[in-house]
Image (tube, grey):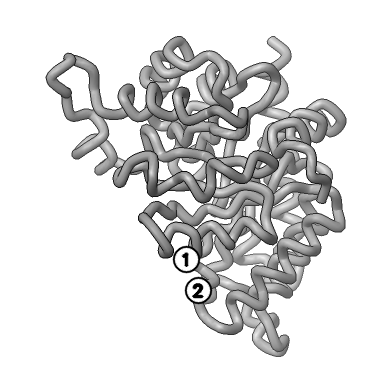
Amino acid sequence: MSETSFFDRLRERIRRRGTVVSVGLDADRDRLPAHLDEYDLPRWAFNRRIIDATHEYAACYKPNVAFYEDADGWRALRETIAYAHGKDVPVVLDAKRGDIGNTARQYATLLSEADAITVNPYMGRDSLDPFLSQSEKGVFVLCRTSNPGGSDLQDLTLESGEPLYERVAALAQLWNENDNVGLVVGATAPDELETLREAVPRLPFLVPGVGAQGGDAEAAVEYGLADGVGLVNSSRGIIFAGEDAGEQFHHAAGQAARRLRDRLERHRES
């Protein structure tokens, strides 16, 4: 992939292809079609078919590394990233990393093969420096997530009166010295999406939760984009759309990706 900035590449991809869809490649081995067991790397065989069926509707792919953290899984992930790049589609690693010192620098080597990564800001700026310093790579900071338990910490009110997630957004804006920072803000929290867009108008959002989690697609499009850049992710709702279709599973995934692309573009054009 080019050494130009991730968000510049993503903006151009969105403009050319007319899509803000992020396809989550969460290749859960327990849900893969049985016929793929004959392959050396079933997760790679699955992802290749998904990419073939969805790449024209995808602004990016977002594999969650939790589904690849074993020897064969890392091989499958590398093949997947290379194949997506061959289709001219960038890859965001959903890794949620964040640590200090040598550990952080080692985590940041994940970006040697991908285009962007999700990170956890809980340990502060120094835990993210090895990611932020790679100006050509994108860094999506967890801010207001789509899971029900996210409010346990993210909604806590600070002495300043602001919720913790707003402080995270403000810090992320300060950390955006290389114009390579975005936020993860769930589509299941549309009010927070609007609040955060007003607070940080220049940061692109990666918005999960549209699809299986039933998030607000209209709010995701309205508030997720900054200067034409942003992503709305669906994982299970796309890749397992054909879970009962046997060897034709990828066709249903392609149809699901196209439907989501069309749905989001209707909101984006309105």
Instruction: Please state if 184 lies on the left or on the right of 166 as rendered.
Output: right
Picture coordinates of residue 111 (x, y %)? 62, 56
Question: Closest to the observer: 36 or 92?
Answer: 92
Where residue 31 appears, as percent x and y from the top left, is: 53, 71
Question: Which image quarter: residue 191?
Answer: top left
Q: Residue 69 — which label?
A: 2
Q: Is residue 146 visible?
A: no
Disc 1 + disc 2, Cβ < 8 Å: yes
Instruction: Identify the residue at image location x=37%, y=33%.
Output: 144
Q: Residue at x 52, y 53 (%)?
A: 94
Task: Give the residue at x 68% y 66%.
Answer: 245
- Secondary structure at badge 1 equals helix
Q: Which residue is mark 1?
A: 66
Q: Is residue 188 above or below residue 120?
A: above
The answer to whether residue 192 of the structure is visible from this angle is: yes
- Is residue 112 found left or right of 73 in the rendered image? right
Tell which of 114 and 214 is nearer to you: 114
Toward the front, the furthest residue is 101
Q: For the residue labelled by badge 2, is the local secondary structure a helix, a strand or a loop? A: loop
Farthest left residue in view = 159
List x then y, in percent, for residue 167: 31, 24
Above or below, comparing residue 41 to residue 62 in the picture: below
Determine whether, in the image, residue 195 is placed left or right of residue 257: left
Count all numbered tags in the image, as a single digit.
Answer: 2
Q: Label 2 neighbourhood size at 10 Å, few (<14), some (14-19), many (20+)?
A: few
Q: Estimate the spatial distance between the alpha carbons at disc 1 and disc 2, rounded to whole Å.
A: 6 Å
Amino acid at dot 2: Glu
Which corner quadrant holds the C terminus?
top right
Q: Amino acid at mark 1?
A: Ala
* x then y, percent, for residue 180: 61, 34
